[in-house]
Amino acid sequence: MVPRSAPIQLFSLIILSGFLFFETTKLGFCSADRNVACKETKRKALLELKAGLTDPSGRLSSWVGEDCCKWSGVGCNNVTGRVTTLNLRNEFSDGEDGTLLAFGGVINPSLLVLKDLIRLDLSMNNFEGVRIPNFIGSLEKLEYLNLSSASFGGVIPQSFGNLSRLLSLDLSYYLFESIANDLRWLPTLSSLKYLNLGGVDLSKAKSRWLPTVNMLPSLVELHLPSCGLSVLPLTLPSMNFASLSVLDLSNNDFNSTLPPWLFNLTKLVTLEMHSANLHGALPETFGSLTSLRTLDLSENSNIEGPLPRSLGMLCSLQTVNLPINKFTGEITDFVDSLSACTNSSLEKLDLGYNRLTGKLPDSLGNLKSLRFLILRFNSFQGSIPKSIGKLKSLERLYISNNQMSGSIPEGLGQLSSLAALDISENTWEGSITEAHFMKLGSLTDVSIYKNSPNISLVFDISSDWIPPFKLRYLNIRSCQLGPKFPTWLRNQTELVTLVLNNARISDTIPQWFWQLDFQLDQLDVAYNQLSGRVPNSLRFISPGTVDLSTNRFEGPLPLWSSNITMLYLRDNLFSGPIPRDISEVMPSLTDLDISRNSLNGSIPLSMGNLSQLTTMVISNNLLTGEIPNFWDSIPSLYILDVSNNSLSGSIPRSLTSLTLLRFLILSSNHLSGKLPSMKNFTDMRSLDLGENNFSGAIPASIGESMPSLLILRLRLNLFRGSIPSQLCGLSNLHILDLSHNNLSGNVPRCIGNLTGFRSDLTNKDTDDYLYQGRLKVVAKGRVLEYNTILYLVNSVDLSDNNLSGEMPVGLACLTRLGTLNLSMNHLIGNIPAKIGDLERIETLDLSSNKFSGLIPQSMVSLTFLNHLNLSYNNLSGKIPTSNQFETFIDPSIYEGNAGLCGHPLPTDCQGNKETPPAPSADGEDDDGKSDRLWFIFSVVIGFCFGFWGVFGTLAVKKSWRYAYFCFVDKVKYAVLDFFSAIATYLQKRS
């Protein structure tokens, strides 16, 4: 008898057998599918695609044989054998190798045969402006499309709107040349989760871009940096893309505040809006972004105000980056609120490049997970809080360029994870001891310096101390390490950068240092009192920099490896000739400064092989011989200074081929001959040929070809002829010194066109003042040497020549002129009455000429004048007594002018007679009556001319009369309105 349950058991057995049969069959098919080859139609389509591409590196050489599924970059479905993936991305896009591996050519329409494509990646190639194929929009099964940085051309095809299954779309920087796009194709991509249009010009989208993007409900990441967006809507009626976790809108020009809708994106993890021209204060609604880990609002120079307290409640925050803004509030409340989060996981706090103020609070030590603390370039004050020692996870501490002061806490030495320390450009005081470095075993980078010669921080470290760290970067400036060379550097064998500048070390560098087995990229021990000889044993990596300037090193010039590019050995006691193998040992030199030593001999011809040289400063030595003729082999030379040597001969022709030369300083030598044409020096800033024996005429090409010239100094030579009028075209000139020559003729009347003397020069253009040199200028009655403030000097010196004629009135237009010296010439006529317009003049020397007439009364307004010399002219009349003239009490200023009288000269302007003239009957002498009559006559004449000069003109000229009475009416009504407003105000107050 069969149990009643038997049918059920039988049915179950049949179902189970069927399932096992299905699974077995399925496994057999799957096993077989692994050997399924691609379809012939797909293979042919891929070969046609290959034929349209240029493949300079042969990356598609594997595309041979019957099974295209085995070809590089091709992926197939294991069951059907259909091509689903085509990855032709250039994985080596950087550098020269990347260019060689890039595909080009055209995309063949045979791609449409691959209807089952799910992934298509053509990124990082170079299609040289070929338009994005419109037919890509027909591949409706695509879920991933990446055309980024592929150098396509044209706008994004509207057909892309058909890709409704697309999950990820990356078109960032796809363009060969920029072209404006819209986003009309975007709303239908309802499945899109990742969208990157970085670098695509979306200016056509205007204010529509946000509502359009908001129609993508599945969007998780949105990247729109550098898209030319200018409108950031402040309102958004509905929030469809509420799942957004990454938003990048950086490098746009919104000119907007942060929009309120931004703070409804509560799932946001990353927010990047740096360089987006945002302004206003940060709102308290930041507290709603509780999932935020990365916040970058850097380089928005108009964001201001304090940090909101709510920002400190983002307990999940891991990165905050707010540099280069105008935050002006204190940080205390912000950090206190951060520390209130018991589960705070803050790992990176970057508030650099702002205007934050106040002190760093002790509560900073509560951020136990902090790894990066970046507060540089703000206005923080006070010292580092002692609680800093609690931040055991801290790896980077950057608080440079603030206004902090006081002592550095020893708790700093407890930061066992610290790798980089930068506390430079603050005013630290007191001492640094071994305790400050006690547990810093991970330390690799240290920077403690300030760009000031004043020293207030002292390293008090014993000579037998062994540091727990191995540094790679050490930069200590304007701190006292000396007087002995620091012995604790003995075990720092991994150093790459070593800077001990202005460290008050007066010692010899010990032998063990030169024998250390490290390779440096920079060695800077300048501005100390180090002495001894320098061996050639150190090794450098490229590009290497050596600066031993301003010490007392002696012996021959040291030469190091071929990797040295910058060598500064100035202001030492090096002697002997310049090594003739300098170009062989250091062929990569770009900057060479060996000035202010005792080097002798000639300039070696081998220096012409330094083809990469941009700066050659060999001034203030004992060099002799002629200037070599090799300059056309150094085409990039920017600065050439061979001044203060004993060089002779003429300027070689090849020197005038240096079209990039900006500073040519050949002064104080024995050079001679006529100057060659200087028409190639089109970028010249400073031309100093003074104190030589040059002769002939001053080339007109100086004024014609050097529009940017700032300094022209030709003093103490043998130049003849007239001053070329072309020099008046040098509109940027601020030092002109042609003194002590044999120049003749008139001072050019166009000298007033030198507009550089009408405005203050500043050091805003660093290229123009990159190299100052040391220039001697005669000012204040003596020779002054200027260096770092040379750009502030405004001087015209034409003294000791044979110039004749009158002083040009145009000189009075040079209102920012500081020194004017026309002495020892043959100038005649009156001193221009407008000379009082030289409002910044400090030195005025017109002595030893033939000037006549009165000293202009306008000169009493020259309140900056502190040195005046009018001696040995034909001046007459009374010396002014107001303002600055009360301080000019030295009679020699005016001697040699027989007609001058008054203080400080002994000649009284009333005469020297001992008996005064007899008074007339009415009490006045004859001279008094005459003066009174002339005064009355001049008043009457002046009144007549003044009255009829104004009202006579109004009577004749109708248009002037109309304009005058309109002006009178306007003044009248303005006065009435003013008093009416006053009366109303007083009435309201009462």
Image (tube, rainbow, N blue to C red):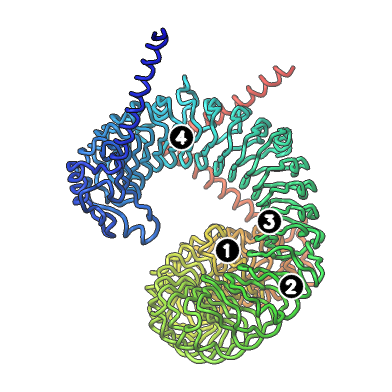
Q: How many marks?
A: 4
Q: Nearer the viewer, residue 334 or 429?
A: 334
Q: Nearer the viewer, residue 362 or 457?
A: 362
Mark 2, residue position: 890
Q: Position of residue 459 (x, y in %)?
A: 78, 65
Answer left or right for 597 relative to 922.
left
Mark number displayed over residue 221: 4
Q: CA distance from mark 1 to mark 4?
A: 61 Å
Mark number displayed over residue 817: 1
Q: Position of residue 533 (x, y in %)?
A: 67, 85
Q: Is residue 841 above or below residue 269?
A: below
Amino acid type, mark 2? Asp
Q: Is residue 835 above or below residue 701?
A: above
Q: Position of residue 622 (x, y in %)?
A: 58, 89
Amino acid type, mark 1? Leu
Q: Residue at x 25, y 42 (%)?
A: 36
Residues at discs 4 and 2 in contact (Cβ within 8 Å)? no
Q: CA distance from mark 2 to mark 1?
A: 24 Å
Q: CA distance from mark 4 to mark 2?
A: 81 Å
Mark 3, residue position: 421
Nearer mark to the viewer, of 4 and 2? 4
Q: CA distance from mark 2 to mark 3?
A: 60 Å
Q: Residue at x 49, y 35 (%)?
A: 247
The answer to which of marks 3 and 1 sits earlier in the sequence is 3
Q: Is residue 778 above or below residue 474?
A: below
Residue 679 visible at all: yes
Secondary element under disc 4, as helix, strand or loop, is strand
The answer to which of marks 1 and 4 sits earlier in the sequence is 4
Q: Position of residue 592 (x, y in %)?
A: 53, 77
Nearer mark to the viewer, of 2 and 3? 3
Secondary element under disc 1, as helix, strand or loop, is loop
The answer to which of marks 4 and 2 sits earlier in the sequence is 4
